[in-house]
Amino acid sequence: MTDSPHPQPLDGNEMPRFGGLATFMRLPGRSEPADLDVAVVGVPLDIGTSNRPGARYGPRSIRAESVLIRPYNMATRAAPFDSLRIDDCGDVAVNAFSLADSVTRIEAHYDMLLAGDVVTATMGGDHTIVLPILRAMARRFGPVGLVHVDAHTDINDSMFGEQIAHGTPFRRAVEEGLLDCGRVVQIGVRGTGYTADDFDWSRDQGFRVVQVEECWHRALGPLMDEVRDRIEGGPVYLSFDIDGLDPAFAPGTGTPEIGGLTAVQGLEIIRGCRGLDLVGVDLVEVSPAYDTSGNTALVAANLLYEMLCVLPGVDRRG
Ligand code: MN
Ligand code: MN
């Protein structure tokens, strides 16, 4: 229990966890974004997907599985809801008939949120959504650093002839000057490519590319020490594609690749971002139709919670 004046998750001893409105972590969901420090936002878009669709249902499933999460982090002692004003601000009204219009709408929505000086914590949606979000971030902060966890680098020039899709956002972001390329790290990339040098485009931009083999059988604390050294000193965006994790932990996603990060390594990466000037975070590509146990959305909800725990201004108790 807490005497904090900030919006609080509904206590499981006041209303059973399976009851009540399905906001993220059972937050009140009644705040004006401008009154908050952190806005949790859903972007239910999946028409940028190349393979299995369904990420439009990601925010809803993440909210549903997030009911189990309690407010205090027992590992790090973080107290995000006592430290910051955090609430679920609902979803962006995307246009299911137009990817281009959806991108415009997302960008306008994030311009509005950032004008209120909030950190955004986004539930996707496919990875297309990070492009309009980064456009809004760069307009507000200038080019940002990036921690990008993913099985894929998402730097295709085009997909089926289209410039905007879930596999192209970071190529467009570089072209548009949205990223501070020397402060970009891609972690967990793997699998098969169209050419053997697919990942080299990222390296040619100055990104640090951590192929998953560099993570296998390892604790990631030392890697995250290196990441922080490389990208601290300016605003940072954290984008976590759930397919960065192995399909054993997160099968409910559109383009799964074997040999991925463990759930524990996902925690190590996020906890290793503490101390960075995070201006926005996201968790994307949860597709509940392939998530028969709900475990992918449960993992996603917990990872998003862990992101809240490392935002600037979050105190640790005890
Ligand atoms: Mn991705
Ligand atoms: Mn991916």
Image: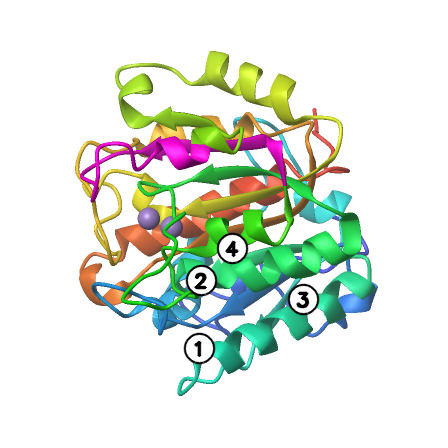
Contact between marks 3 and 1 (CB within 8 A): the answer is no
The magenta span reads 180-202
Q: Nearer the viewer, residue 115 or 24?
A: 115
Residue 110 shows which numbered tag? 3
List the residue tagged with mark 4: 172
Earlier along the polypeptide chain: callout 3 or callout 4? 3
Contact between marks 2 and 1 (CB within 8 A): the answer is yes
The location of residue 62, given as percent across then percent down, is: 41, 60
Q: Is residue 57 left or right of residue 283?
A: left
The amino acid beneath tag 2 is: Thr
Earlier along the polypeptide chain: callout 2 or callout 1? 1
The amino acid beneath tag 1 is: Leu
Q: Residues within 10 Å of mark 2 (few under 14, many from 20)?
A: many
List the residue tagged with mark 2: 128
Front disc: 3 or 2: 2
Contact between marks 3 and 2 (CB within 8 A): the answer is no
The amino acid beneath tag 3 is: Tyr
The amino acid beneath tag 4 is: Arg
Q: Examine the rendering and report whether any part of residue 91 can be seen.
A: no
Q: Please name the residue shown 41% across and 47% down the image.
A: 155
Q: Is residue 220 left or right of residue 28?
A: left
Q: Nearer the viewer, residue 45 or 81?
A: 45
The location of residue 307, given as percent across then percent down, is: 56, 42
